[in-house]
Image: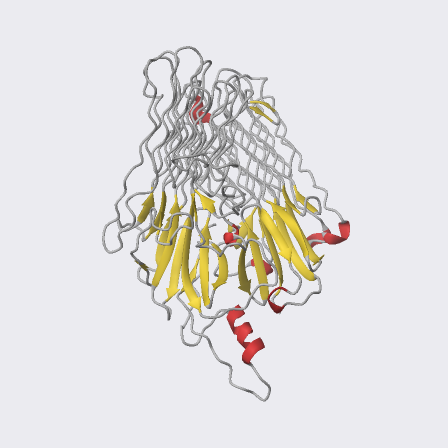
Amino acid sequence: MGNRTTRSPHPSNNTTKTDGHLLEYFRQNFGVGGGAALPVPTTGISATGGVISDYTQGSEVYRAHIFTSTGSFDVTAPGAFGDTVEYLVVAGGGGAGDDSPGSRSGGGGAGGYRTNVPSDNAPSLHRSSATFPVSTSPGSYTVTIGAGGEGARGSGQQGSTGSDSIFGPPSSPERIISKGGGGGGGNLSGSNSQNPGAPGGSGGGGGASTDSTNAYAGGSTISVTTPSPWPGPSTQGYAGGQGYHQSGSWATGGGGGGAGAVGEAGTNSNAGDGGIGLSNTIAGPAPTGYGGIGANGPGSAPAGWFAGGGAGLANNGGTGTGGSYNGTSVVPGGPYAGGASSTNNTTGNNGTESTGGGGGAGNGGGGQGSNGGSGIVVVRYKIAEISADAKATGGAISFYNGKTIHTFTNSATFANPTALNGGSPNPLAVEMIVVGGGGGGGWDRAGGGGAGSYVHATNMAIASGSSHPVVIGGGGEGGFPGSSGQTGNSAGFQGTPSTYNSSTIIANGGGAGGATSGSPTAGAAGGNGGSGGGGAAHGPRAGGTGTAPPTSPASAATTDSGGKSFQSNGGQGAPTSGYPYVAAAGGGAGGAGGDGTTSGGPPYPGVAGGVGKQLPSTFQDPTSGVGFPGPSGDFWVAGGGGSGSTDNGTGGPGGGHPTATSSYAGGGIGGFSPVTPGRQLLGDGRSNSGGGGGGGGNNPNNTILAHGYRGGSGIVIIAYPSS
């Protein structure tokens, strides 16, 4: 999650200080009347960062730090169980290729997968036996989460390679680096460099072309070495499958490689399935939820799977399955961590967020290659021999200030079993935060994407013996030329809702950013949603309206300030005229805590998205990395996306930050021209923030550089008294 930039390290002593929940456990189980001495358990290292998951395996207690956004793992004191940690580092998956009539593209390769914890389905694969020592010097260990590669947007083009994920000390080569997954091959006429799959952590699937006598190979996997003193695994994935060529129209794309197997080659009738991924219990044991991370696995396997390859595309309308091919046969089901391919002129399925899955290939005539899933880093260590147990199951579970906290970064189930671990069969009284997925920014001098709705429920009664689905909303995709977003051509896409128990609590997805779309009169208004998207330049175009979601029954959602949810309106775009490509800027998008900024006059800089909301004190565990920096410290979410601008060199900041190059509450920064290829740093809304994506900048000669940015996925957090 977010980097803790403003919090001072808290002192710790491994002989006198203990985690609050462990102390409470000993009070309940060993403290007796008459002033009896309290046994103090020994503890592991003290550290901060990421979402915390505490769990027991046998008699051993582990703490896992789960990072779905870039941050740092900060060691503040040594421990009694050795100063080493275990890790899982998965890079962003590759984007799928784009097809063209008569020919088909390849799926994206999975992000590189490296660990020193045995994987469930292949204990020795990509695993190092070396420990990873940590200390208070340097103390801070950088965590970089690789973004998923973009699916190709031009006919027949190769998808983009995902970004690397990294864990290790700053300014040092002695780090664990997993390479981004290779982009899936396209299918331009004749022999073309865009047609083979690209190399990566796992290679992208090869494309196919009816104009060539050769099939195109899948991309290879890149070997990585890590210097002494802690050598990591040198292999991290498998090659993509070869595309299939046959004279005529029956060409098919290969599947992207996965962490567990090569991608399947295309055949004369079937698309290549993506290579299977790997499962890992580093953040929590099976079958109680794997710490709430990972995608579903083959057949009836539960979550906890990572780095599945994206599926290739068949010309006969058949689809491929992401992350299902195990090297010799196809495992039923899917799509697992990798994206499935599509039919009927639609975009394929994206790789699952925070798994490193490759994107699935899209069908032509309006369908583009899909995006790879972002990566993940998990760091764990032993903290004790015994622990207080949670009363319920689901998500990453931690204990703070007398409360048990369940943090959901992926969709799962929250269950209150009858008298679990000796708990009371009575209903649990919970406090809950539900944040929808952020909207995507529009294309070209565009409005930012709106934040997802923020719902704060208190004193909800969860019946004993009940279970409730938790759905985490996805961030909306940024606008691109020809996209059909919520508000029209080239606009961004609305985020999707996060929900608890289907309709008991609904947090709307953020509104889409409006797009200028290359004409003085074609600017689109920002989309309505959780918080409204920013309006595009020209016209001017209004920002979208924040829309309160239904939250029933009403008695279950009494919240701070007396409201059931929090969302705001988007700002208006600049009132300019003239063509082509005049100076202009879109409006900032609404955040959960305030409206987006309306664009002003020359030189038309990008303007800020609206401020977000700070999580209640219940969820402000100083060892946790939930939330992001904001106007008053940490733990902020649901900031609006900043707007895109033109050649003045400043995109709008996210979440109301006063500095153009910075962001609050997970909101993305708007783009501008000139910009470098690929996604601008901090342009996307942060994962599990509900922050809106930044609006696209302006580059008339390269439509990729004017892309809108993705919204951040949502989050659900549930707390109840531990005793």
Residue toward you, 656 or 462? 462
What colour-coding does the image apply?
Answer: secondary structure
Determine the residue located farthest toward the front in the rendered image.
329
**Residue drawn 50% across and 36% down?**
652
**In the depicted structure, whether residue 190 falls above or below residue 420:** above
Residue toward you, 261 or 592? 261
Determine the residue located farthest toward the bottom in the rendered image.
34
Q: Is residue 657 left or right of residue 156?
A: right
Residue 219's image quarter? top left
How many numbered marks are there? 0
x and y percentages locating residue 355 in the rendered image:
46, 43
**In the depicted structure, whether residue 638 falls above or below residue 26:** above
Residue 325's image quarter? top left
Decide if residue 646 is in sight here.
no
x and y percentages locating residue 705 in the rendered image:
42, 26
Q: Is residue 187 left or right of residue 222?
A: right
Q: Is residue 529 left or right of residue 170?
A: right
Residue toward you, 373 or 650? 373
Residue 265's image quarter? top left
x and y percentages locating residue 54 in the rendered image:
49, 61
User: The C terminus appears in which quarter of the rendering?
Assistant: bottom right
x and y percentages locating residue 59 in the rendered image:
46, 68
Decide if residue 216 is in sight here.
yes
